[in-house]
Amino acid sequence: MSDYNKAGDKAVVRILNLHKYFGSLEVLKGVDLEVSRGEVVTILGPSGSGKSTLLRCINLLEKPTGGEIWFEDTCITDPKTNINEVREHVGMVFQSFNLFPHLSAKKNVMLAQKKVLKRSNEEAERIALEQLAKVGLSDRAEYMPSQLSGGQQQRVAIARALAMDPHVMLFDEATSALDPELVRGVLDVMRQLAEGGMTMIVVTHEMGFARDVADRAVFMDEGVIVEQGLPEVVFDNPRHPRTRDFLGHIS
């Protein structure tokens, strides 16, 4: 695989007036958001603000109730769109690692390449080893998930997503299930991806990462985007009282 290159500022993801109900509960209330190629956007906010639901709507793990989502030039909320073809270009890393316990790290990274992209065993293995090297796990390729720490398992999950040549990576609280001493290794991998130009949308409570690595910080509360901007502006001079209150409690 070649390194990830920024290719101008064309929007990779466009979200227009997005609504999501769970029964009578409206979780997303008309969200608009654009993410450009090569941009790193962090989504911040309290629990229940709609952050993870927004992320899961981007690849239709949750079906929006209203509005549109565009991925590159495709409206993925159009019922005629083949969402599985779109998902091939969207990598997602969850809180839980979702590794197959009976497969080694290498084979976990190989599986979707062979099943979805129809790569040969040899090519899938080569790419799996390349991606495991990128996340610092060359020496753990043959280990089973039970032999890996939580942080190492999460890095395998990142390698698995990267092996699919995604155009955008979605991270949903990727470090929240980890012990504090294991968080840094995962964040270091995410920093390297950002520096390499990968388009990333990151739901996180890691404020240091959001401040230092993101191109833009987005603050959500009660299903809407309250404010967004350069991280140093949002963190150091938030305009909205709700943002100030949230950041004041976590600082």
Image (cartoon, rainbow, N blue to C red):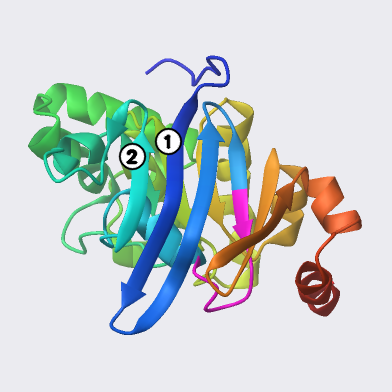
Q: Main secondary structure of the magenta part?
A: loop
- 170 is higher (above) or lower (below) than 10: below
**Can residue 115 be seen at all in this image of the molecule?**
yes
Nearer-the-camera pick, 181 or 168 = 168
Quadrant containing the C terminus is bottom right
Helix, strand or loop status at disc 1: strand
Q: How many marks?
A: 2
Q: Earlier in the sequence, mark 1 or mark 2?
A: 2
Q: Amino acid at mark 2?
A: Val
Task: Tell me where residue 32 appears, x and y as whole percent.
Answer: 52, 49
Q: Amino acid at mark 1?
A: Val
Q: Residue furthest bottom?
A: 24
Task: Tell me where residue 51 appears, x and y as whole percent.
Answer: 51, 64
Q: Residue at x 28, y 46 (%)?
A: 142
Q: Which residue in the protein does label 1 denote?
A: 168
Tell me, yes or no, whether the highlighted magenta stretch contains residue 120: no
Task: Tell me where residue 158 appears, x and y as whole percent.
Answer: 41, 46
Estimate how packed mark 2 is, as few (under 14), some (14 to 19) or many (20 or more) residues with alpha carbons within 10 Å: many
Q: Which residue in the protein does label 2 denote?
A: 90
Q: Residue at x 90, y 56 (%)?
A: 236
* Magenta-colored span: 42-50
Q: Are marks 1 and 2 in contact (CB under 8 Å)?
A: yes
Location of residue 214 (image quadrant): top right
Location of residue 115 (image quadrant): top left
Tell me, yes or no, whether the highlighted magenta stretch contains residue 44: yes
**Can residue 214 be seen at all in this image of the molecule?**
no
